[in-house]
């Protein structure tokens, strides 16, 4: 059988899965398989029928092969390497996720859906590179730190830092540098850690008895590639388990300490780390003109990998632990999960659910889980319990905390009846963002008449509890599946899905009130106090607020508003109010006029400029001011920029006018004046001598 030009090999695992070739072929054909009639059901593919796999990779080596088994993938990979290393094989699990279940005989639609999903071509991922030269710091309080450093010294360049040591006995041979001090701050990542140390001092090599120290100082700084923290105190980093290169085993657990030493010993060289988040500052609503708006990603990042950077934010890919909470809460899609890209997640949902419905499945429940804890729980349920119900479709994400309104809306828009999220223990303290997204989604679904409880976390800690919760779910009618294409950014895809849910809703209300902080809504403007300065338009990061270049007019596009509050913060008159709501009517797609007024015309030339309210407000505020007490001073405020300049320089009493400019003198002027003076003096002399008549 082929799916998307890929050969599919299916095995019933020695009959442990109740698979019927005809029934499964029919389901796969309905789901879009290329030649489901050619389905051949193996029964012992990994052993007695291994030749069937070998034949596929040798004879048809130019075609990709999908093997519906993950447990025995090492055997298949070994066979592929020996037979045809150029062949490409993928593996998907239908046994624990579908076949091993009390309802395994009814799981054909789910199996067809899982095979269709497996046939998708995953996109590549971008990475960042970190390099470790093996410079390691062992931080502790007693001899345990010295012992650990001694074990690592043969593989790494180790330094020991002991905090507040008490009668510490030195080793017979000092094979690693030993210092005392207390780390007051730490930053960085694998290959680039920096620490600040107080009470810092080297050991005295000549001390007899316990280690003695040179005079201590504060404010020391050092760098290293790796840190082993055996202090037993508070972690040096938030969400420390995600900080690559930082190891913090429990000092009282020898097995954990030895595992950390084993892992650290080989951490020398270059390491590629996925770039989990893609950031687009152009659509970020964090700030404008040094005013703060949206801080959702900053509020939920457990690793402190996100920091303000002017009007945008900065995401450090070396510190980012990949939880995806920033993607979950980002209202614009500026922070988008990229492992894999969100577009591929939407494509998986569409393929999976479309195949499930076409194969005859109904009322599906989407089980969102991670590929580690989630897969383990599902495997335990299948091996020792009832397995997954036939209508519960597992959907793996790199981290469940990356799920948000966009994923929930798309899944429901494609006909999912309920969503359950299996949270691993390591994420239990990082659920604020996910919980807010569930609350928001539930408010929308309840407002559209779908009822409450459609989306929830699985609270059980063990496989038996998870199994009980899933099997106890009462069947609820799922929304009619839509045919929309998940194209565009996060915001666009979310709105497409919400409009599909509105179209299929039992109670299709056009306007739904939402809780405070929701990234959807409108603004109210007190037009009586608005001077139409349009500062709000310049501050809006999404283009929800618009101006009219032809006349004083303020318009608003509700579908683009993310309720960041920048317009409210920027407004000098404080006349803007945020109203969280979801408007699914067609009117919300276009701009509506919030305020407009005729322009104010220049009292000298009649040219329109400014607005009536703005000019009148300025005139009123400046009336009586000493700088505008002269005749005609206030009238200049009511003139356009051209007339204001003309009147200013034609004023009879210009307050900026200086004394008359002196005439320019030349040498000729001096000579002429000299000649006149000499002639005058001669004339006066002649008169005095009587030689000239008066």
Image (cartoon, grey):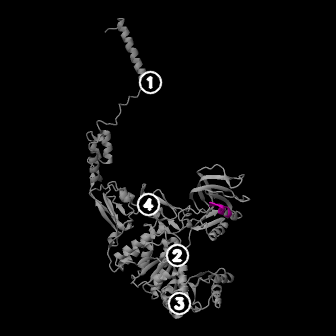
Mark in the foreground, 3 or 2: 2
Q: CA distance from mark 1 to mark 2?
A: 96 Å
Mark in the foreground, 1 or 3: 3
Can you say whether 213 is above or below 543 in the image? above
Q: CA distance from mark 4 to mark 2?
A: 30 Å
Quarter of the image holding residue 155? bottom right
- Identify the mark at residue 246; answer none if there is no mark: none
Mark in the foreground, 1 or 4: 4
Mark in the foreground, 4 or 2: 2
- Identify the mark at residue 667; answer none if there is no mark: 1
- Identify the mark at residue 286; answer none if there is no mark: 4
Can you say whether 509 is above or below 173 in the image? below
**Residue holding disc 2:** 370
Which x, y percent locates residue 559? 37, 68
Q: CA distance from mark 1 to mark 4?
A: 70 Å
**Residue holding disc 3:** 36
User: At numbered mark 1, what does the secondary structure look like: helix, strand or loop?
Assistant: helix
Q: Nearer the viewer, residue 662 or 59?
A: 59
Other residues around mark 4 within 10 Å, as few (<14) / some (14–19) / many (≥20): many
Can you say whether 517 is above or below 532 in the image? below
Q: Tell which circle, 4 or 3, labels the residue nearer the N-terminal end.
A: 3
Asked if the residue at tag 4 contacts the one at tag 1, i.e. Cβ–Cβ closer than 8 Å, the answer is no
User: At numbered mark 4, what does the secondary structure look like: helix, strand or loop?
Assistant: loop
User: For the magenta stretch, what is the residue range?
Assistant: 137-147
Q: Nearer the viewer, residue 281 or 274?
A: 274
Tell me if residue 146 is in the magenta stretch.
yes
Q: Which quadrant is the N terminus positioned in? A: bottom right
Q: Tell which circle, 1 or 2, labels the residue nearer the N-terminal end.
A: 2
Asked if the residue at tag 2 contacts the one at tag 4, i.e. Cβ–Cβ closer than 8 Å, the answer is no
Q: Tell which circle, 4 or 2, labels the residue nearer the N-terminal end.
A: 4
């Amino acid at each position: 059988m082929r799916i998307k030009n890929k050969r599919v090999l299916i095995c019933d695992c020695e009959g442990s899965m109740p698979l019927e070739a005809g029934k499964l072929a029919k389901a796969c054909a309905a789901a879009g398989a290329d030649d489901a009639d050619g389905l051949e059901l193996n029964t012992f593919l990994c052993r007695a029928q291994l030749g069937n796999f070998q034949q596929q990779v040798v004879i048809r080596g130019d075609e990709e092969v999908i093997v519906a088994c993950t447990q025995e993938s090492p055997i298949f990979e070994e066979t592929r390497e020996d037979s045809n290393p150029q062949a490409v094989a993928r593996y998907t699990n239908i046994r624990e996720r579908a076949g091993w279940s009390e309802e395994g005989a009814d799981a054909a639609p789910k199996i067809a859906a899982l095979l269709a999903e497996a046939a998708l071509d995953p996109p590549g991922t971008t990475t960042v590179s970190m390099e470790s030269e093996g410079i390691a710091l062992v931080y502790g309080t007693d001899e345990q730190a010295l012992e650990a450093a001694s074990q690592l010294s043969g593989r790494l360049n180790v330094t020991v830092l002991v905090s507040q040591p008490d009668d510490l006995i030195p080793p017979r041979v000092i094979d690693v540098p030993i210092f005392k001090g207390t780390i007051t701050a730490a930053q960085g990542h694998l290959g680039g850690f920096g620490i600040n140390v107080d009470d810092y001092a080297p050991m005295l090599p000549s001390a007899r008895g316990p280690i003695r120290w040179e005079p201590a100082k504060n404010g020391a700084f050092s760098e290293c590639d790796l840190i082993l923290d055996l202090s037993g105190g508070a972690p040096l980093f938030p969400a420390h388990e995600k900080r690559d290169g930082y190891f913090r085993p429990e000092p009282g657990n020898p097995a954990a300490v030895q595992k950390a030493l084993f892992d650290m010993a080989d951490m020398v060289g270059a390491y590629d780390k996925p770039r989990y988040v893609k950031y687009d500052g152009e659509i970020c609503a964090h700030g404008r003109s040094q005013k703060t708006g949206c801080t959702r990603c900053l509020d939920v990042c457990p690793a402190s990998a996100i920091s303000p950077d002017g009007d945008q934010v900065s995401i450090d890919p070396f510190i980012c632990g990949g939880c995806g909470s920033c993607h979950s809460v980002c209202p614009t899609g500026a922070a988008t999960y990229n492992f894999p890209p969100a577009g591929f997640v939407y494509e998986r949902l569409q393929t999976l659910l479309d195949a499930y419905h076409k194969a005859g499945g109904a009322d599906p429940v989407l089980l969102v889980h991670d590929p580690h804890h989630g897969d383990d729980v599902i495997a335990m349920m299948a091996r020792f319990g009832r397995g997954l119900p036939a209508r519960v479709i597992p959907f793996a994400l790199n981290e469940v905390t990356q799920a948000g309104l966009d994923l929930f809306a798309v899944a429901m828009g494609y006909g999912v009846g309920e969503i359950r999220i299996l949270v691993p223990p390591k994420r239990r303290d990082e659920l604020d963002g996910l919980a807010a997204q569930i609350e928001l989604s539930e408010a929308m679904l309840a407002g559209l008449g779908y009822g409450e409880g459609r989306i929830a976390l699985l609270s059980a800690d063990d496989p038996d509890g998870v199994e009980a919760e899933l099997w106890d779910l009462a069947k609820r009618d799922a929304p009619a599946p839509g045919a929309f294409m998940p194209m565009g950014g996060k915001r666009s895809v979310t709105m497409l899905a919400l409009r599909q849910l509105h179209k299929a809703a039992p109670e299709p209300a056009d306007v739904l009130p939402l809780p405070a902080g929701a990234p959807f809504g409108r603004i109210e403007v007190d037009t009586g106090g608005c001077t139409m300065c349009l500062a709000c338009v310049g501050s809006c990061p999404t283009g929800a607020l618009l101006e009219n270049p032809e006349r004083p007019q303020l318009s608003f596009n509700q579908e683009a508003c993310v309720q960041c509050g920048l317009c409210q913060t920027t407004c000098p008159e404080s006349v803007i109010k945020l109203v969280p709501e979801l408007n699914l009517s067609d009117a919300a797609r276009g701009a509506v006029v919030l305020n407009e007024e005729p322009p104010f015309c220049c009292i000298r030339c009649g040219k329109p400029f400014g607005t009536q309210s703005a000019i009148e407000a300025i005139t009123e505020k400046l009336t009586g001011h000493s700088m505008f007490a002269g005749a005609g001073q206030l009238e200049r405020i009511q003139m356009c920029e051209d007339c204001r300049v003309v009147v200013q320089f034609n004023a009879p009493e210009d307050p900026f006018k200086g004394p008359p400019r002196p005439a320019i003198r030349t040498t000729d002027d001096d000579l002429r004046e000299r000649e006149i003076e000499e002639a005058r003096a001669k004339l006066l002399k002649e008169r005095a001598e009587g030689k000239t008549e008066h």
